[in-house]
Amino acid sequence: MITRRRTLALLAAAGAVPGLAACGPNAPRGGGDDAEGGAVRVYWWGGDLRAGLTRDALDLFTESQEDVEVSPEYSEWTGYWDKLATQFAGGDAPDVLQMDEAYIDSYGTRSSLLDLDSVADVLDLSAMDEAVLETGRLADGTLVGAPLGIGIFSVGVNPVLLEQAGLEMPDDTTWTWEDFAEISTQVTDWAQGAGEDVVGFDFFGTAAAELGAWARQSGEQLFPREDETLVSHDTIVAYLEYARALVEAGAVLTPSEQLEDFAAGVEQGRFGNNRAVFHLQFHSQVQTFQESSGSPLQLLRLPARTSGDHQMVNKASMYWSISAQTANPEPAATLVDFLLRDPEAAKILKIERGVTAFPELQTEIESVLDENEMVSLDFARTMQEEVVRPPLVTPASGVGFGDELSRLGEESLFGNRPPADVAEEVLSLLTGMQPEP
């Protein structure tokens, strides 16, 4: 399995390559196999749906830009980062690449990504929501990623199963994690009595996005700014204990079943197969689950530690970045500008990569969205009235935290170690991963 730790090791190797290390954000561009004026290589991760939509948009681009040749490449998430790090290490990076929040600081601070402000005459991001655009900047202000859209960590819900269980849709403006545990348990109790292979909630207790939300609702952060507070030992303990309490109440699958369901993915997992009522996800992912389940899934706010204080945030769903190695900075920037801002391209790409952060394009694409797709767009629009300041992107020093939390969370979930002991190690790891001031 490709892990963040493996990718970080490859990235460190890439940073040691002399040609790459010399490529700062404002350094002269060159290198790689493509000569100036050659094909613009664009690389992204995703499944068949994303690949098809992207190729259609690229075809539209080449129709309008006949002097720019585009060479598309894509892979699944699990192989993407390994291949990308190897390409950078070998001086053969793609010109345009899809980038994720967990890695953008790692690549950016190693001077692997182009300063997008240097091509602002071609790539116009002035109309993007400023709070979202800021998530593509490094600590020194260098813009290395253009957000494709926003993703909001939220609760997916299957209303059909909820109705079958004889339960009403919860009021997500007031519900707490205790309320969430109660209704999830009620679903499981109904299913057991009815002989249905259904659970209230599929899995919880091992994901950085979960702990990050739990910390925000506690007035803390995993990677705090100077005016913010690092997550405390007590907060981590409360998160781990809640995860174990869900298992004990039957609200969620057993630990071993949780791991199996997570590994099964969308098409084989419970939520995507109408066998779980609730699932935590970034909101635009609901489309994939809708397609898999065939059910009219809906989105809810996260439960809160204190009723009404959900601390919902906009996360950049992903980014387009340009390699600092590129021999084609202007054509690459022209392509990114097209993919982000062209109305016809937006109608092709829709919101599969997240709800666009350009408000005028949200209106533009409404005419081509179906009922399921409008669930994501409507939810994002509603949340804009209450989202709070987004957290810092994961710093380069913290790239491995997600893997470590998964490992430690499993130890707590299975009861191999007390939550207090696990929380102490989690906090120690986080403390050591904080970026240097």
Image (cartoon, helix red, strand yellow):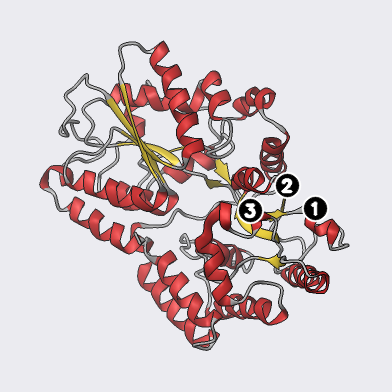
Q: Categorize mark 3 by other alpha carbons within 10 Å: few (<14), some (14-19), many (20+).
A: many
Are circles 1 and 2 on residues that touch, CB within 8 Å? yes
Q: Considering the image in quadrants, where does the C terminus appear? A: bottom left
Residue at which label 2 appears: 295
Q: Amino acid at mark 2?
A: Ser
Q: Which residue bears the numbered disc 1?
A: 160
Query: Residue 248, position in %: x, y?
Result: 68, 82
The quarter of the picture where residue 333 lies is top left
Residue 91 versus residue 162: which sits nearer the camera?
A: 162
CA gap between label 3 and label 1 equals: 13 Å
Q: Residue at x 53, y 80 (%)?
A: 233
Q: Which comes sooner in the sequence, label 1 or label 2? A: 1
Q: Residue at x 67, y 36 (%)?
A: 373
Pointer 3 or 1: first along the chain? 1
Residue tagged 3: 272
Q: Quadrant of residue 402?
A: bottom left
Q: Secondary structure at mark 2?
A: loop
Q: Earlier in the sequence, mark 3 or mark 2?
A: 3
Quadrant location, the N terminus? bottom left
Q: Is residue 109 visible?
A: no
Please report contact status of discs 3 and 1: CB closer than 8 Å, yes or no. no
Q: Could you tell whether 258 is left or right of 110 in the image?
A: right
Of 134 and 351, which appears nearest the observer?
A: 351
